[in-house]
Amino acid sequence: MTRGVTGFNGAALRSARLGTKCEKHAHPLTAACLARKVGTSKALILSYEHGRSSPSPQRLAQLAAAVGVPAASLMTRDTQLSDLRVASGLTVSDLAARLGIAVNTYRRIERDGVMPRRRPGVIWDLADVLRVDYSRLRMALHRIPAVQKRWWAAATVLKDVTDRAVNPGPFAPVEDTSTQAQLLATLFRARAATVSQLMNIYLTELRQLASQLAQAKARLDFTTSTRWMNRPGFGRDLRLWL
Ligand SMILES: [Zn+2]
């Protein structure tokens, strides 16, 4: 038996089914009629809808066709790219062929979230073929463990640099030969010079913001510490000194 797809959304199947008319009986599609359409039992349809079991990729494709929605809309939002592909009933080589890229190039997208540089628009084609919207696809890409690992590593590097940048005092710009720039460049397959340039723009803005914030805080502290001046009688006393 084929393993069911991960991230199947039974409630979405149910609502799509109830929104579909049965061609035979002219009433909302019942579980029994849907079962007949895809060649299975009513019990199994109900078990899908109640989240007790998950359909195989092939069955999911049949169900989606029977209720007239894209397979991806019968999946939960926490799906990875591989789930979306499987839900569409496409193999890795099918999808690579549809996109006009090498199988290994597609594998790198699905496994590592790495887009081929020669086909910058491939993500749009991918959304098209999988019949999902762009934001949904972006989310699926962000759920790839390799991508999450990369962002985590980047966040760690950036936090370190940021912490040093917001401290008052001299700050040396990030050199493209620095460990941080090199690491980020590797993670995002960009040039270290581009990375350090972007980081320095960002860090300069951040330093300005931090210094404005420190000034505002100093003003606030001053106001708070001088609040006693507003006590009744203080003005009068002050006038005596002036
Ligand atoms: Zn019917």
Image (spheres, rainbow, N blue to C red):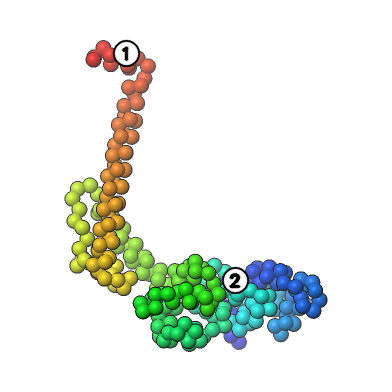
Q: Residue at point 31% right, 73% down? A: 189
Looking at the rendered structure, the kind of residue marked 2 is Ser
Name the foreground residue: 229 vs 81.
81
Residue extending farthest to the right is 25
Q: Is residue 199 above or below residue 62?
A: above
Q: Is residue 75 left or right of residue 19?
A: left
Q: Is residue 154 left or right of residue 9?
A: left
In whole angstroms, how far apart are the C-alphas of marks 2 and 1? 73 Å
Q: Assign a secondary structure to mark 1.
A: helix
Image quarter of the N terminus:
bottom right
Q: Residue at point 33% right, 30% down? A: 223
Looking at the rendered structure, the kind of residue marked 1 is Arg
Q: Is residue 71 left or right of residue 42?
A: left
Q: Position of residue 215 (x, y in %)?
A: 28, 39
Q: Position of residue 238 (x, y in %)?
A: 28, 16
The residue indicated by pointer 1 is 236
Name the foreground residue: 129 vs 1.
129
The residue indicated by pointer 2 is 73
Q: Is residue 211 above or below residue 109?
A: above
Image quadrant where residue 9 sits = bottom right
Answer yes or no: is residue 79 visible: yes
Q: Position of residue 106 (x, y in %)?
A: 43, 82
Name the foreground residue: 65 vs 31.
65
Q: Assign a secondary structure to mark 2.
A: helix
Image quarter of the C terminus:
top left
Q: Residue at point 81% right, 76% down? A: 25
Q: Residues within 10 Å of mark 2 (few under 14, many from 20)?
A: some
